[in-house]
Image (cartoon, grey):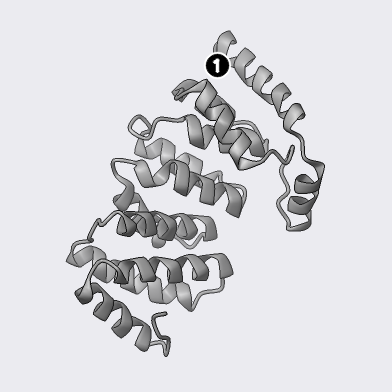
């Protein structure tokens, strides 16, 4: 890391003190979100900061390495989606420390990757909670944008959907159910497939 980036990271970390919200930080700790440091900064404030800084690959990489909630969220907002390599995306995915960071990655970065759907299916097949969570969140966004999966993608998605809904992770079950609603909205054929799949496990599409 060059000295300019180091100084930027230092300045950014110091600025978090001014955003500190003890009540939010305490609430997160109660929910089991234990970061080395957590200033409780709100997402709108972090987005405002990201807009002021602008897209910056090197700074994002440096911020992600910090075990600080705000640094990791800011990194997801600053890194250019078209520049992050698949292997770097895999490293970040392995290092996700919480459901919040998984969701911020999905919404701020993963859905915009040039290879988003490929990664989403790969993560669905993982046995790790946060990878599965990201996979369903990304597909939800792609479905919302009208992106239709091919036949192989449909079969893979439905298989993983049924596994997830019957799985042991509440966060993944919720994300899976949201994704199938968006899948059904792609058109009548998709709606029928979704209803048929859910019927096999005695569920109905809401």
Left or right of 167? Residue 145 is left
Of helix, strand and loop, which one carries label 1?
loop
Give the number of marks. 1
Name the residue located 26 percent from the left edge and 57 percent from the top edge: 146
Q: Quadrant of the N terminus?
A: top right
Which residue position holds label 1? 1
Name the residue located 22 percent from the left edge and 70 percent from the top edge: 187
**Position above or below: 56 against 174:** above
Q: Residues within 10 Å of mark 1 (few under 14, many from 20)?
A: few
Q: Quadrant of the C terminus?
A: bottom left
Report whether residue 72 is seen.
no
Name the residue located 36 percent from the left edge and 39 percent from the top edge: 86
Residue 150 in the image, given as x and y percentages of width and height:
18, 62
Name the residue located 74 percent from the left edge and 37 percent from the top edge: 39
Residue 33 in the image, given as x and y percentages of width and height:
70, 51
Left or right of 156? Residue 75 is right
Report whether residue 79 is seen.
yes
> Which of 39/84 is in front?
39
Residue 141 in the image, given as x and y percentages of width and height:
37, 55
In the rendered image, the residue lying farthest to the top is 3
Q: Quadrant of residue 156?
A: bottom left
Q: Quadrant of residue 176?
A: bottom left
């Amino acid at each position: 890391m060059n000295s300019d980036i180091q100084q930027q990271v230092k300045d950014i970390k110091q600025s978090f003190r001014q955003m500190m919200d003890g009540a939010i930080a305490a609430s997160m700790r109660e929910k089991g979100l234990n970061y080395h440091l957590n200033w409780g900064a709100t997402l709108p404030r972090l987005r405002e900061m990201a807009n002021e800084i602008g897209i910056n690959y090197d700074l994002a990489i440096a911020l992600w390495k910090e075990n600080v909630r705000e640094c990791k969220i800011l990194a997801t907002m600053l890194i250019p989606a078209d520049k992050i390599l698949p292997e770097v995306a895999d490293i970040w995915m392995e290092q996700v420390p919480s459901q919040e960071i998984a969701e911020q990655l999905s919404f701020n970065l993963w859905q915009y990757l040039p290879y988003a759907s490929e990664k989403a299916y790969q993560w669905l097949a993982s046995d790790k909670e946060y990878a599965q969570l990201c996979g369903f969140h990304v597909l939800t966004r792609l479905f919302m944008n009208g992106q239709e999966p091919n036949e192989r993608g449909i079969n893979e998605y439905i298989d993983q959907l049924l596994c997830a809904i019957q799985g042991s992770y509440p966060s993944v079950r919720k994300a899976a159910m949201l994704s199938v609603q968006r899948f059904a909205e792609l058109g009548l054929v998709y709606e029928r497939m979704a209803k048929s799949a859910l019927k096999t496990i005695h569920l109905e599409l809401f």
